[in-house]
Every structure is written in C-alpha cells, then in structure tokens.
Image (spheres, coloured by chain):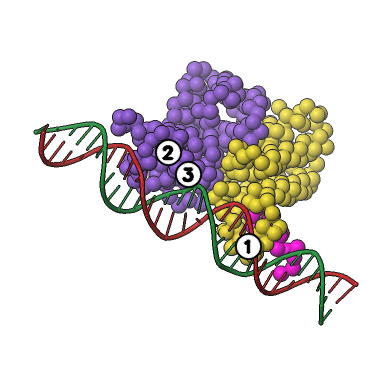
Chain colours: A yellow, B purple, C red, D green
Amino acid sequence: MTKPDTRLKILNTAAELFRTKGYYAVGLNEIIKASGAPKGSLYYYFPNGKEQLASEAVRLVGQRVRHEVEDQLNKIDDAAASLQHLLKNIAEDFNTRKSNYFSVALLALETVDNNGDLKTACREVFDEWAEMYRLKLIRSGFCDENANRISIMLQTLMEGMFTFAITKNDPSVFLLFAEVIPKLLES
Amino acid sequence: MTKPDTRLKILNTAAELFRTKGYYAVGLNEIIKASGAPKGSLYYYFPNGKEQLASEAVRLVGQRVRHEVEDQLNKIDDAAASLQHLLKNIAEDFNTRKSNYFSVALLALETVDNNGDLKTACREVFDEWAEMYRLKLIRSGFCDENANRISIMLQTLMEGMFTFAITKNDPSVFLLFAEVIPKLLES
DNA sequence: CAGTTATTATAGCAATCGGTCTATATAGTA
DNA sequence: TACTATATAGACCGATTGCTATAATAACTG
C-alpha cells in the first residue's frame, strides 16, 4: 500500500458511509474496517478528526457529482431534454449505482446545528450543485433571473426525489418528475 | 407530575429532538434531561427502548402534521390555491414555529438500513402525507390517476423544500415553488 | 390502615465512541 | 549504509451509549 492511496481510501470509504448512513451513525472504527486502512493513519492524514474527514468527504462528493451530472447534461443542448435524460438515467441506475445518488440531504440535515466546517461544506455543495444547473440553463439561453430561480428549484427537487426514492426504495419518482421538467422550465 | 404526562412528555421531547437532530445524534440521556422526566420511566413506558420511542415519535409527528396540514388545506376549496396558501404560511412561520416543519426526511434517510419498526414508521408517514394530498386533490375534482401521481410529487417536493430551507436557513424556496404549484397541478 | 400496583431513582454493565500517545515499521535520500 | 521523514500499529483514555436490575417511593384500592 503506497502512501497516497491510504488517504484516498479512507476518504472514499468515509464518503460512501457518511453519505448513505449519516455522520452520527458511522463511527471511525467502521470506516477503518471497511477501508482496510490502518487506524493510526486516520489521525495522521486527518489530524482534526472525524469532522475534518466528513467535510472533506462531502466536498469530494460534491465535486464528483458535479462532474458526473455536468457530463450527462452536456450531452444534450436543450436544457429540458438534458434534465429529463438525466432523471431517466438516475432512475435506471438507482438500484445498481449508489455512486449516482446525487444527494447530501442526510448529512446536511443532521449537521444543521454543527458549528464547524461540516455544515459549511454541506451548504457549499448545495450551492455548487445549484450553480451547475444554473450554468446549464444559461448556456441554453435562459436569462439570469430565471436561471437563478430554476436552478434552486432543481436542486431542491433533486434532494426531494432522492429522499423519497431512497425512503420508499422506489425510483419511479424520478420518472414522474421527468415528465414535469418542461413545464417547470417554462415557469 | 401525574402519570399520563410523563409518557407524553418523553414522547413529545423525543419527537422534537429526533426530528430535528436525527436518531443517532440524540442519546436517551439528552431526551431525559430535556423532558425533565425520570430516567426510570423511560424504560417503564417504552420497554423496547430507543427504537420504540423513535417509531412512536415518528407516528405522532405524522399524525400531527397531517391534522395541521389538512386544516390548512381545507380552508380553501381549490387545490392549487390551498397549496399555495400552505406554502406561504410555512415560509412565514419558518423561523418561529419549528412544529411546522412538515418533514421526516432526516429520520427516514438515516434509518433506511434499519430493519425494525422505525423504518416502517417513516415509510408509513410518507404514505400518510401523500394520502393527505391525494384526498385533497380528489375532493377538488382530480381523477384518481392524477391525484395519485401529483400527491407523490407533492410529498417529494415538500421533503425537498424543507431539506433545502433547513440546510440554507432560507424559507424563500417555499415561495418559489408556490408560484409553480398551479402548473404542477395541471400537468 | 395494610396490601398491592404503578412509577421513579439510581447504581451498574459491557460496549462503543473519538481521540491521544508512543513505539515501531517503512520509505526516501545522500 | 546511516539518517531522516513518513506512515503504521495498537494500547490506552475518559466520556457516553443503550440497557438492566433492584430498591425506594408514590399512588391506588378495599
């Protein structure tokens, strides 16, 4: 095991566990076991402890999701069509690719009272993802005001859809909203 | 302190804490302290422990929210107008009435892997709330198929809006979507 | 009032928690 | 090879966790 891999391994494992189970439900020993990394390394690489690990994990997820979603959105020029396509892909992959859970709702909600970097990180990811939609809308010809408004609605909707789909273990809600996207974008 | 009050006091406190902070972030000692109830009573009244307490709390919240939302929706016959009114009230009350947080997203997401009654309770509350919207739509003249579809979308949207508003500490997202409700209902 | 039942008080348990610390192992460099 | 820097191993800590058990207290009933 070479040096850079250990840090990334811990971070990747933490990202997965924190995002799906939440911050308080996952202990550091669980991350260590699941990652196969040495416990001494955890504090070596993340000297500020659990919260540092979690906030870095959140930011990592934020960037990865952004890249993935942007890739998908950029395949089709039209904003509505590209969003519909995205939602259909999410529904299709729902049971097979957890990495395509484009949501940090759980972490965001449970860390609302946190006064540290973790809460900031979650908020920043919300902003980053809304920005991702805004840029797509702008590139598709939407005016600034509408792009701002609709991007916030899209980010809100995405979190809601994942919450519903994960809770009910049913991805069809993505398809429901895919049908509504054109109307939403013309509002 | 009379007997029936102790149980309810624990339950109310647990409902508030679990719903806002989550199941794993709140320990029983915190609930006991916040409620002023005796610790011995906790296991006396909730012999199956923390999970029983949480699932009863979830169900209690589910019913209370249902009553509150139904009351508000029933003030106006038209479905779109009543929903818009509801969202505007939520936005207004956001910083003053936490009891008007009509969401169990946090609990639902963190207990997805739970195999007990708590997960069931969260799912049931999602269904109950969707049903609440469905009945309103039916009473407003929507056909069964549309009422079903739109009620799921409304419940999804509500969870998304609360997630966004709580994370960003900004209730304006409710007002954003209030404008879109008529379009959503005619879709 | 005495006896029974309901409720509370509180000590104690094993396990887990996030974190600290030190010794050791490994990797890099001249 | 020797030295330095980096990374790992693992024991340990105090605090907290959810829960059990028992004794004490309070409430109820005839």
Say if residue B180 shows up in the picture. no
Amino acid type for the residue under numbered disc 3: Gly
Q: Please tell me how crowded label 1 is: few (under 14), some (14-19), or many (20+) other residues with Cα within 10 Å.
A: some
Q: Which residue is mark 1?
A: A39
- Distance Cα–Cα, label 1 vs label 3: 26 Å
> For numbered disc 3, what is the local secondary structure?
loop
For label 3, the residue is B27
Residue B171's image quarter?
top right
Q: Nearer the viewer, residue A174 or A43?
A: A43
Q: Determine which of the numbered discs, if any, sits on residue B32 in the image.
A: 2
Left or right position of A29 against B53: right
Residue B53 sits in quarter:
top left
Whole-percent x and y of residue B79? 54, 23
- Range of residues picked out in magenta: A1-15
Q: How far across and how far down the image is residue B118, in percent?
A: 44, 45
- On screen, A106 above or below A153? below
Q: Main secondary structure of the magenta part?
A: helix
